[in-house]
Amino acid sequence: MSSVKSLTETEEKIREILEKLDQLIPPRPFTNVNAATSAEHCRATILNPQDTYCRGDQLHVLLEARDHLGRRKEYGGDFLRARMFSPALKAGASGKVTDFNNGTYLISFTLSWEGQFFLSLLLIHPSEGASALWRARKQGYNKIAFKGKFVNGTSQVIAECGIVLKSSAQLCTYLHGRDQEAFYCIKPQEMSCDALTHKCTQQSKISYLTVKEKDLIHKSKVGVEIMKNYKYINVSGCNRPKKIREKCQVGMELPVPGGYTLQESWITTFCNQIQLDKMKISGCLKGKSIYLLGDSTLRQWLKYFPKVLNTLKFFDLPGTGYFNKHLLLDTERNIRIQWKKHSYPFISNKFYSVKDQHYIPLEIDQLLGGINTVVVISFGHHFRPFPLEVFIRRAINIRKAIERLFLRSPNTKVIIKTENIRETHSDIENYGDFHGYIQYLTMKDIFKDLNVGIIDAWDMTIAYDNNEVHPLGPVIKSQINMFFNYIC
């Protein structure tokens, strides 16, 4: 009875989230590109401009959206990205965008550092493009094709697989019953379904966008600057005392933005961040088991940890391969750090083993937990080409697994790292940041009110202006520093 009830609750929650997003991104049909929002014709005005601002002030910009013929837009939904930055200070911060749904937007910046800075406001996609991407995402699971390798002694068979598989052939069903997560393969003749050992993926050439819509999201029209030729803005200290903030800890609510970069270091605005030296980090990690569950942006952490603590050494696990479990050990201090990829959908054109692969909820359920156990979770990029319900279901199931973990071990630390922005012009229909942003909003909604630490990689990578799926060293260093602040 309880599993049926749980399933109903999950389906209901998925439906609620999708309905909310349908309202946020309504259909915006257009007859030609001229009717879409034009970065060149948009008008941005700084409200109440001053010669000099004080650190801590808010600066507001009013944006009036216009189309390519200069006509005022009467609806919102444009996908915008706001940033303030200072190249000389290696400083940056994201801005907060408020959509009034009538063609006007308020862009708010918190002036967090002293000196000169510039403003940037990018039109990533016009509302018509965002609407087209949202419609296209909902239309099918077949933009990525899965292949499974079945092995029986010296015999190997490659079969078609997928999250949804339309075939009259006999299917192998790999079902995680309680969470109702399934994966399917066409069953090879004279082989058991248990003979599946490896998977890989390949991009199909399927598109659900019209020719006009493709033109709208062409790479030349993605991320166009709106605030051109604006002079720099001055900020001084104004002798304002710095606010005394609480130490960073799990369970804190993150504002937007949650911090800024200065001299390439991330500085939080919602908690008192401590810079830990090698000795303190070593003491903090002593006796701890850290489980990194997710994608390759968390595997970057594993590679970076030995730079922070050189006593950590990789333990060579035989036969696991690049995409499977990786392990760091410090036997003297009894430190164990492990990375495992999340289960399907995991996108790779190289075959990877499925024998040491479980859904993140199942990985969490297998942990006893405790004061010396830390779990870090990050997923998103591999979900972007699929209908959003796949991502929502996984996020809900992960939340439920965390709640079960806290019931048996409330002093376990859990950290959620959101996904980051990535290359602006790479396969926008499947992997563009519009999809990532929808997942980012969904993730924050599902994990709110949970006693976890959040590392806002989306906010961070905008501040750093790091448009790469695998962020650069300073970003990883800043993420790990936040991680230490949560657990030490």
Image (spheres, rainbow, N blue to C red):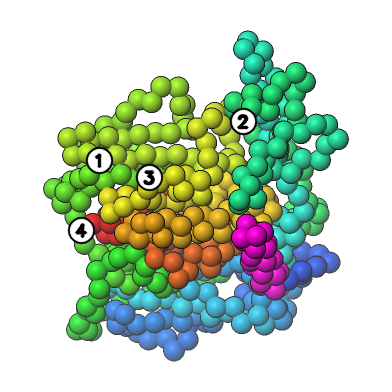
Q: CA distance from mark 2 to mark 1?
A: 32 Å
User: Which mark is on residue 335?
Assistant: 1
Q: Which residue is mark 3?
A: 291
Q: Which residue is mark 4?
A: 275
Q: Mark 3: which amino acid? A: Tyr
Q: CA distance from mark 3 to mark 1?
A: 11 Å
User: Which residue does the image show at 54% across and 30% down from the upper left?
Assistant: 355
| 2 or 1: mark nearer the eye | 1
Badge 4, how many Cα within 10 Å: few under 14, some, many 20+?
few
How many marks can you see?
4
Query: Which of 75/307 is in front?
Result: 307
User: Which residue does the image show at 49% across and 40% down from the upper left?
Assistant: 341
| 4 or 2: mark nearer the eye | 2
Instruction: Name the spot of residue 227 as percent of width and height, x first.
Output: 52, 71
Which quadrant does the C terminus fall into? Answer: bottom left
Residue 235 falls inside the magenta stretch: no
Question: Which one is earlier in the sequence, the residue at label 4 or at label 2?
Answer: 2
Residue 16 falls inside the magenta stretch: yes
Q: Residue furthest front?
A: 1
User: Which mark is on residue 134?
Assistant: none
User: Which mark is on residue 199?
Assistant: 2
Relative vertical location of residue 403 with respect to residue 311 in this rendering, above or below: below
